[in-house]
Image (cartoon, rainbow, N blue to C red):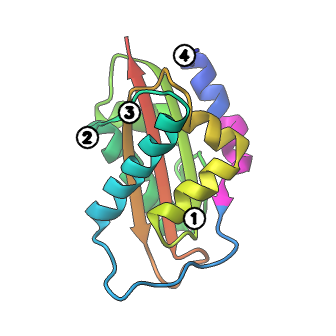
């Protein structure tokens, strides 16, 4: 079932309390993947989870990626994890500002502290609300944001923005 524009806004506020943080760090690899490779791996791993549930693969969307990255930058810059931005932005306002228009459904997952793409997708899959977004077969597009910022409470910040258009 597609999430209406109104319900998308309500879910953003309601799910703010379910933002994830990592409880333990994954071992560091010798050569850290590039930010682009990390984001591509999140899409790949998310699509693998969707395939197990019989959902079609999500397609990369540049506007949602811009919205997700901006939100991850905001979370890292202000050292918080949540769905409402430091200036009061919401998933809906961020998607619009980034140029994702004509949508009929939006969803967002945020997390912090996970060092790897596998770690963050695993965390999201353990959370009922985040898992529901990943396995929502009516969603079509995905953009991923990731920021690594040592010296902050979490060190890494992640955003998945999902959408579907009319």
Category of crowding for the residue at label 2, using alpha-carbon neighbours closer than 10 angstroms: few (below 14), some (14–19), many (at least 20): some
Q: Secondary structure at mark 2?
A: helix
Which of disc 4 and disc 3 is earlier in sequence?
4
Q: Main secondary structure of the magenta part?
A: helix
Q: Which residues are magenta?
A: 13-20
Which of disc 1 and disc 2 is earlier in sequence?
2
Q: Secondary structure at mark 4?
A: loop
Front position among marks 1 and 3 = 3
Q: Position of residue 49 (x, y in %)?
A: 51, 43
Alpha carbons under labels 3 and 4: distance apart: 16 Å
Q: Position of residue 81 (x, y in %)?
A: 61, 59
Check if mark 4's residue and mark 2's residue have beta carbons within 8 Å.
no
Q: Secondary structure at mark 1?
A: strand
Which of disc 3 and disc 1 is earlier in sequence?
3
Alpha carbons under labels 4 and 1: distance apart: 27 Å
Quadrant holding the N terminus: top right
Alpha carbons under labels 2 and 1: distance apart: 22 Å
Residue bearing the label numbered 2: 62
Q: Position of residue 166 (x, y in %)?
A: 37, 10
Q: Which numbered circle lies on residue 2? A: 4
Q: Is residue 86 above or below residue 2?
A: below
Which residue is at the front of the view, 62 or 1?
1
Residue bearing the label numbered 1: 112
């Amino acid at each position: 079932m597609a999430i209406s524009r109104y319900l998308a806004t309500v879910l953003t506020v309601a799910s703010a309390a379910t933002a994830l943080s990592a409880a333990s760090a994954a071992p560091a690899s010798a050569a850290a993947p590039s930010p682009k490779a990390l984001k591509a791996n999140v899409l790949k791993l998310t699509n693998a989870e969707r395939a197990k549930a019989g959902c079609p693969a999500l397609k990369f969307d540049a506007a949602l990626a811009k919205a997700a990255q901006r939100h991850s930058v905001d979370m890292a810059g202000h050292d918080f994890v949540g769905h409402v931005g430091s200036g009061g932005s919401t998933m809906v306002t961020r998607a619009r500002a980034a140029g994702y228009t004509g949508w009929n459904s939006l969803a967002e997952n945020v997390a912090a502290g996970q060092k790897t793409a596998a770690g963050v997708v695993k965390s999201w899959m353990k959370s009922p609300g985040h898992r529901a977004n990943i396995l929502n077969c009516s969603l079509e597009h995905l953009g991923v944001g990731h920021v690594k910022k040592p010296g902050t409470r979490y060190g890494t910040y992640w955003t998945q923005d999902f959408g579907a258009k009319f």
